[in-house]
Image (cartoon, rainbow, N blue to C red):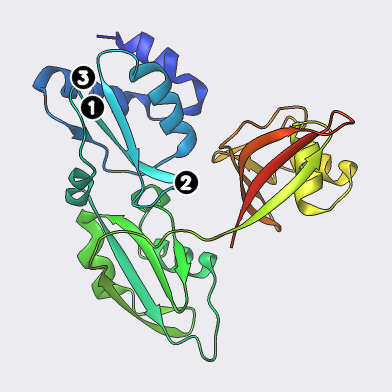
Amino acid sequence: MLSKNDFIKSCGNSIEDANKLFSLYVSALKSGKTMITNEFYTVNVCNVLKSFLSTKELNVLCYGFVDDAERCLIAFSIGEIDLSIFDDVAKVLKISYNDKFNKLSHRDFLGSIMSLGFSREKMGDLVIENNSVYVPVVIDFVDYIIQNLIKVKHSPVNVAVELFNRLPQKRFEILYKVVSSLRIDNIISSLTNVSREKSKLLVKEGKIKINGIIESNPDKKICENDIIVVTGFGKFKFKEILGSTSKNKNKIIVDKFI
């Protein structure tokens, strides 16, 4: 078993509440039971934990009730982990409204839920589909939200537990790009159709997140499966490198979230 110091050191600076995660890690090892967080963590935290724990004495599984979730619950277990175990920790809420006269945004729904007194860590990804928004919420707060979330902005809403307790699959537009390098500033320039100088400015202004973490280094290289969020331009997933052109440029595939 890793010592507390070694665990926290392995987590690095990317995980603020490493003490809480360490406690779950120890509990899973000592009890032999599966332990699950009661908060959602960014995919960056999940990747860090899996990288140094899954190769040792413990399995780590991150799940956000949909493929490619940005925010996930984390389970620790000495044995295999069944996805159904996450259903005991969080429920997916379906928030519906009449969109005939008013279109509500992701930010509108998130702000209204948080105004009830909830931190962002108690919720997973918000997925919009037609006139409804789906969001997994830690089970302790489900009833409170159902009873108290009456309006989002000026629109009345109806809140209920989603029958299948899963988020709708996210939709993508597939982008095929040719880039001279995999540096952030170069990738951002290609995805947003702005100049390299403008893309570097976006990085310096803190408007670029990679796997949920603000990235301030325009020289950093993007890796396959990285999630890229560009404020004002949208969210993307770097899928894979297809190969090179005759001029040694990279041919890449990127999913743009719709």
- The disc labelled 2 sits on which kind of residue? Glu
Does the image show residue 5?
Answer: yes
Q: State if disc 3 and disc 1 touch (CB < 8 Å).
A: yes
Residue 241, image x, y percentages: 67, 34
Q: Residues within 10 Å of mark 3 (few under 14, many from 20)?
A: some
Q: Secondary structure at mark 2?
A: loop
The relative height of residue 116 versus residue 204 in the rendered view (above or below) is: below
At x 12%, y 28%, the residue is 33
The label number, if any, that marks residue 24 in the structure image: 1
Residue 1, image x, y percentages: 24, 9
Q: 108 or 68, which lies in front? A: 68
The relative height of residue 161 versus residue 69 in the rendered view (above or below) is: below
Judging by the rendered image, the residue that carries numbered circle 2 is 70
Q: Residues within 10 Å of mark 2 (few under 14, many from 20)?
A: many
Q: Secondary structure at mark 3?
A: helix
The C terminus, quarter of image: bottom right
Label 3 or label 2, whichever comes before in sequence order: 3
Which quarter of the figure has residue 215? top right
The label number, if any, that marks residue 26 in the structure image: 3
Does the image show residue 215?
Answer: no
Which quarter of the figure has residue 103? bottom right
Q: Residues within 10 Å of mark 1 (few under 14, many from 20)?
A: some
Disc 1 and disc 3: Cα gap in Å? 5 Å
Residue 108, image x, y percentages: 51, 70
At x 62%, y 31%, the residue is 223
- The disc labelled 3 sits on which kind of residue? Val
Disc 1 and disc 2: Cα gap in Å? 21 Å
Q: 26 or 186, which lies in front? A: 186
Horizontal side of residue 70 vs 165, given as left or right: right
Label 1 or label 2, whichever comes before in sequence order: 1
Q: Secondary structure at mark 1?
A: helix
